[in-house]
Image: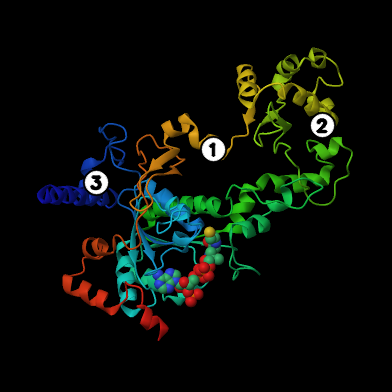
Amino acid sequence: MAKKKRKKSKQAKASKKSARKVVKLAPKKAAKRANGNGLPRPSNRPWGQAGKALEGVRILDFTHVQSGPTCTQLLAWFGADVIKVERPGVGDITRGQLVDVKGADSLYFTMLNHNKRSITIDSKHLQGKRVLDELVKTCDVLVENFAPGALDRMGLTWEHIHKLNPRMIVASVKGFGPGPYEDCKVYENVAQCAGGSASTTGFREGPPLVTGAQIGDSGTGLHLALGIVSALYQRMRTGRGQKVLCAMQDGVLNLARVKLRDQQRLKAGPLTEYSQYGEGVPFGDSVPRAGNDSGGGQPGWILKCKGWETDPNAYIYFITQAPVWGEICDLIGEPTWKTDPEYATPRARLPKLKAIFTRIEQWTTTKTKFEVMEICNKVDIPVGPILSMKELAEEPSLRKTGTVVEVDHPTRGKYLTVGNPIKLSDSISEVKRSPLLGEHTDEILKDVLKFSAKDIAEIKNSGALSAPKKEEKAA
Ligand code: COA
């Protein structure tokens, strides 16, 4: 058994080694593998078995809470070796937030930290700094989302990092970019409000609303991942790393881009596709909240379906797409609207959208949301059922594609998570459980950083990798 284990770890090491070589091919080998254009020959391995997209990339993951961990989790799913550095004894604060199983890491943590390794290091301890410097030398990317200035206060300034490893990419999430708010701490909803999402979400008569989709945190993590992959690509030409910065305000504004579009369109007159136009309510000088109006040029609204009186999610999003207007009229029993000049064209319909949706709703309330979905899609009318989290968790097609995955965890047991939503046909993501706090400290010191047993003992005895004892704390 022990022999088998050793053999396996030898193989794992060999495959990791070869993966690194793919990225840093020696010129002779590269020439041998290259075809006439200097590009690698297409692999003849079966699809999905030619390694992972980011194999050979090592990430020093200094992230916490949601935005940064979303980014590094994606990179890990694409095959990067993500080493998460956590504060001894505490770890990422989310391990202990919103706890549902006593004594186990929370779902908040487990669902954002799959496929990573965890090492505990006190980054302010002298011996901790020694370990961190070695990690900087060995890794390709450092990802962090501390409050502004925290990384510098640890001594990990760009100058220090770049001196130790000129190839290192340093990727950061911050709340705001350079400007009046750059020093502020930011959480999800602050970003939604500062990035233009909240002012444009909700109903006109009501207050601004935040959305349940974590566009500030997870959205910015996604942006950061793209920045990192681009910097890795550029490094192949330049040989040097660079800083990558994603401000949450910028990320949200990017996702709310259509609203800045509408802001500028206001100069040309009222926004005719907003239902406020049909209701005769004048527009002010900034983009109003648009309720459930569609964000594009095809009017839409959320309509009740059969059962709405008791089921909070018995609704459907219904789009009156112009090319299928005839089909909509036939379905709802208003065939004359196909030719009636008051209804026949999109322009004629704009001032009457509310009345039109009320009529369509008379039809949708006679059907369940799934019946509406089936009937409408047969004739190409774009509609979308309002799916509850319960329905999504139980949806077999999402399980089949790996978008919803069941994972086993040693202290909490089985739980559901969202797998990699980005599917690569030659780099298939497996979802592995999140690490326990400091689970991989020893193997990282020994196998990645190549510290000797004597050095490891010295570092450990210094207290740099463990939580201070209670008495010491009190003292
Ligand atoms: N060892 C020792 N100290 C550590 C450590 C470690 N391994 N890891 C973190 N710390 C320290 C930091 O150095 C910092 O200390 P300092 O302020 O004395 O320099 C301290 O822990 C706290 O870090 P901070 O980032 O300020 O955490 P916070 O809990 O006070 O704030 C946020 C949390 C999210 C508000 C803040 O990190 C932030 O604004 N991040 C950027 C925006 C962001 O990503 N927000 C979304 C989060 S989902």
For disc 3, the neighbor class at 10 Å (few under 14, some 14 to 19, many from 20) is some
* x then y, percent, for residue 205: 82, 47
For disc 1, the neighbor class at 10 Å (few under 14, some 14 to 19, many from 20) is few
Query: SS class of the residue under badge 3?
Result: helix
* x then y, percent, for residue 369: 64, 26
Q: Which part of the image, by quadrant, shows the C terminus?
A: bottom left
* x then y, percent, for residue 83: 34, 59
**Gap between marks 2 and 3, in whole Å?**
64 Å
The residue type indicated by label 1 comes to Lys
Query: Could you tell whether 263 is left or right of 102 in the image?
Result: right
Query: SS class of the residue under badge 2?
Result: helix
Residue drawn 62% across the image and 30% down it: 385
- Residue beneath disc 1: 390
Residue drawn 37% across the image and 70% down it: 88
- Residue beneath disc 3: 30
For the question of whether residue 158 can be seen, the reply is: no
**Lower position in the chain sequence, tag 1 or tag 3:** 3
**Gap between marks 1 and 3, in whole Å?**
51 Å
* Above or below, comparing residue 185 to residue 429 in the picture: below
- Residue beneath disc 2: 354
Asked if the residue under mark 1 is in contact with the one under mark 2, i.e. CB atoms within 8 Å, the reply is no
* Above or below, comparing residue 157 to residue 174 in the picture: below
The residue type indicated by label 3 comes to Ala
